[in-house]
Image (cartoon, coloured by chain):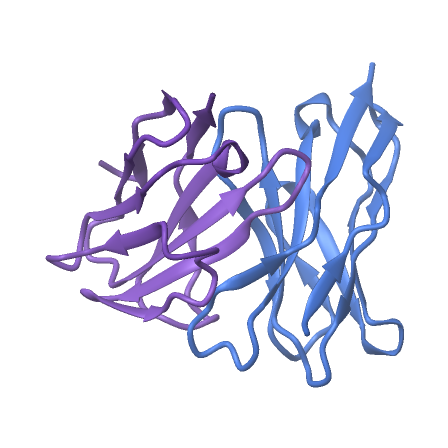
Chain colours: A blue, B purple
Amino acid sequence: AQSVTQPDIHITVSEGASLELRCNYSYGATPYLFWYVQSPGQGLQLLLKYFSGDTLVQGIKGFEAEFKRSQSSFNLRKPSVHWSDAAEYFCAVVHYGGSQGNLIFGKGTKLSVKP
Amino acid sequence: GAGVSQTPSNKVTEKGKYVELRCDPISGHTALYWYRQSLGQGPEFLIYFQGTGAADDSGLPNDRFFAVRPEGSVSTLKIQRTERGDSAVYLCASSLNQGALNEQFFGPGTRLTVL
């Protein structure tokens, strides 16, 4: 069955430092991959997505992610973290084939930002 | 409204009671998804509607859970004989059309607590 693994439950970084959140997926074919952010009291917001083509994708709020097929990974990065980035981040893969679009999420990584 | 809305935002009920959770999708969106997010977990797919019909209800945990979307817009998730294990945040998302290429927009969720 498809699955998404986010190995880090909680990460703390200093403001201005770089960030990398890890995501691994299991799926035989090329997956459709997503990163969402969830702030307290807010709905999930799409940061970026990968369907095909260039393996480095740019998203909103200065985030980017790189798809690496050989490692089954889709890690999220940001060169300089802002205090407002503190939130929970979810990696997701769309269910087989993508014709319906229902998502399979990882357990999330909570990001804390130190001043 | 501009986004997906869900009511109520919080619902506290007693074990064995019946509850209804409502989702108002973005106007014109034909696809609607329900997810459940338990504490410390990522959202888990419950059911997906395309128009008025439930195209995929494979994520509903058992027959106590049921959802409708009679006019192809508002959807109601119904839970009978609630159990303490049903306590979670129930998320609704809508997209313009079905399929992975259409971004899902999430509502803020309904937090259900079963005492």
Q: Nearer the viewer, residue A82 or B22?
A: B22
Q: Is residue A20 above or below residue B109?
A: below
Asked whether residue B88 appears in the rendered view, the answer is no
Q: Residue at x 63, y 46 (%)?
A: B42
Give the image location of residue B17, x and y in percent: 32, 30
Q: Residue at x 48, y 70 (%)?
A: B100
Q: Where on the picture, by quarter, is residue A88?
A: top right
Residue farthest bottom in this picture: A29
Asked whether residue A3 appears in the rendered view, the answer is yes
Q: Is residue B80 above or below residue B87?
A: below
Q: On the picture, is B65 further left or further right than A106? A: left
Q: On the picture, is B87 further left or further right than B22? A: right
Q: On the picture, is A21 further left or further right than A48? A: right
Q: Where on the picture, by quarter, is residue B40?
A: top right
Residue farthest top in this picture: A115
* Image quarter of the C terminus of chain A: top right
Q: Is residue A15 above or below residue A21?
A: above
Q: Residue at x 51, y 31 (%)?
A: B84
Q: Residue at x 78, y 32 (%)?
A: A81
Give the image location of residue A66, x and y in percent: 78, 63
Q: Is residue A51 above or below residue B77?
A: below
